[in-house]
Amino acid sequence: MTITRRDVLLGATATAALVPLAARGQTSEVVIGVIYPFSGGSAQQGVDAQKAYETALEVINKKTDFDLPLAKGEGLPGLGGAKVRLVFADHQADPQKGRAEAERLITQEKVCAIIGTYQSAVAVTVSQICERYQVPFVSADNSSPSLHRRGLKYYFRAAPHDEMYSAAMFDFFDAMKKKGTKIETLSLFHEDTIFGTDSGKAQAKIAGERGYKILTDIKYRANSPSLSAEVQQLKSANADVLMPSSYTTDGILLVKTMAELGYKPNAIVAQDAGFSEKALYDAVGDKLEGVISRGTFSLDLAQKRPMVGKINDMFKARSGKDLNDLTSRQFMGLIILADAISRAKSTDGEKIRDALAATDIPGEQTIMPWKRVKFDEMGQNNDADPVLLQYRGGKFVTMFPPQAAIAEATWPMK
Amino acid sequence: MTAQAIIQSLASGLLMGLLYGLIAVGLALIFGLMDVVNFAHGEFLMIAMYVSFFLFTFFAIDPLLSAPLVAAALFVLGAVVYLLVVRFAMRAKANAGMVQIFSTFGLAIVMRGLAQFFFTPDYRSIPQSWLGGKTISVAGIFLPEPQLIGALVSILAFGGLYFFIHRTDFGRALEATREDPGAVALVGIDKNRVFALGWGLGAALVGLAGAIMAVFFYIYPDVGASFALIAYVTVALGGFGSVFGAFAGGIIVGLVEAVTALVLPPSLKSVGIYAVYLLVVFIRPRGLFGSM
């Protein structure tokens, strides 16, 4: 544990300094930049992400028998078996630091691609720098829809965005209504950075189109010392469904404050983020029996695809945690990126970009419940089907869409 | 907006405000004593929360019981910080103010880094404690027990501090040192001892706040930052150098925050705090109860 922590803090700079310059120039090694928050409020996400990337790195660099791109051989076959090396950089959840670190990775560390970033707000600046230097950027786990709509040529996202997720939530509501469940009113509760704002907008838009009434739409300040005024408003509105879009800290405080103020909604359908985090369930899981969160990943898939379970074991050995919605996307993101670099047979940015654009991986060759990985002209994979998971008896169970479900939803949640 | 919602908001704001006051009093005490702003104040709070968390996790001591222990531990930490860091920073001949700012600011960063190194950045919380999750409901108004006890402790701690400063020999020595640090040596008061005591007391007060907050707040290395910012505003609002002002300032900040969140979108609730602060500074630059 201590060693890896040190790796996080010192690894990026130290390894770069120790590796002789000559070695870095050769293509026996392909360097990819990984930008995450390794300090500050979201540092845990960065630490977990690092474990996910190291797991993917092991699959890429070593011989395994998984049915994933690059898993069977050692290194990148398109580059004569060159090994991938990761350089980790800390953006501290600050878009400006993200920008500076991206620039440093490209100009100093000579990375041929960058992957990141957890916070969508940071992905905005990092992807702009990548665009300027013509270095591909893979957005592994950012979910803001506005990210891929900026017409960037070097931006790619294999995972769904919040409009796709939100649409899945409303598909689910529609299906529940058909069965006779009363779902008419909603309370939106989202934080005030790009993630929460985009998520709230997407949900408000779809709710309007499909005839759901929004009783209250609360945009709150991220990392507030207190959420009692906000929860008070949610409680007064008392909608059929509460839909939070919060990171972990605010999610914990929200659930605690709800309990303190005696507010128990019929159902919570969450936009992932904090609500897919182990830390949140460790803290307040007893109050969240039956909470529903969207996701792109479900450990249930291991029943159909055994390699999902094996990769989860590899990840768990490193981190002590099961793969979740975020770490699974990070794992897949690096596999997809490395596969493109191998097919590009080059570390040239433009060639990698073209290889990424030509990506076509069938869903079975991923650890996700996706149809396939194929990017549209905006760099978005529209075949990444989201799933809805329900938290029951200490774990998540897939209950929507029907083709991925292994159980019916419990509604109301209590 | 119902009357109940308004009363609920005001009650929540008052409970939170008393806690803000408790956090700010320690900061005001140190500033009043020696004109040093402790930029590591939020980190003291963070350490207190971790101490409380570990006492609960490893020894199953309820945070309510461990609060005095945490306060004592923080007292030692505060005194040590004074003796090892601040004392030397105070000796700076040139740019003394800057040296003090950067030494406590640097200390804050070091403490945060160490916390992340040793405790990992994971979010912790105390799941089952005597008070955790319990709430008293009076006529539809919910008063969470941890915050109620926090408010009570806050009032008692402030009362105790007030008594200590005004009624004991050490308190008088504190006041005297604050009036004229040079002259007290003539009557045999050891300035360094008094300053160390002041730092210890200030840290112990924020330690109490941290121990109680550990029950209802999440704990991670950066947790102090948002509270520290409020504490600085609280001290400035209440008046630099006034312990009473800091306490009153805390209550005002809590109430203003709650009222702002009622009438404006919640994402703007801290705007209210800063607006009131600006107004106070505009009318009374030394703060509401400031004496300087």
Image (cartoon, coloured by chain):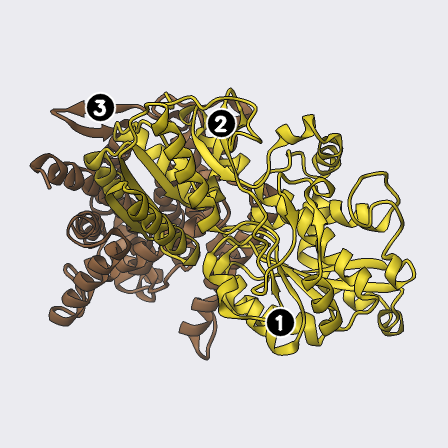
Nearest-to-viewer mark from 2 and 3: 2
Circle 2: residue type: Tyr
Q: Report the chain holding disc 2.
A: A
Picture coordinates of residue A30, whole percent (x, y): 81, 64
Judge whether B197 appears above or below B36 on screen.
above
Question: In the rendering, what colour is chain B?
Answer: brown
Q: Report the chain holding disc 3.
A: B
- Which disc number belongs to residue A130? 1
Q: Residue furthest left?
A: B3
Can see residue B140?
yes
Circle 1: residue type: Cys
Callout 2 touching callout 1 (CB < 8 Å):
no
Q: Report the chain holding disc 1.
A: A
- Which disc number belongs to residue A391? 2
Q: Residue furthest right?
A: A80
The chain letter of the yellow chain reads: A
Circle 3: residue type: Ile
Which quadrant would the C terminus of chain A be assigned to in this image?
A: top left
For label 3, the residue is: B136
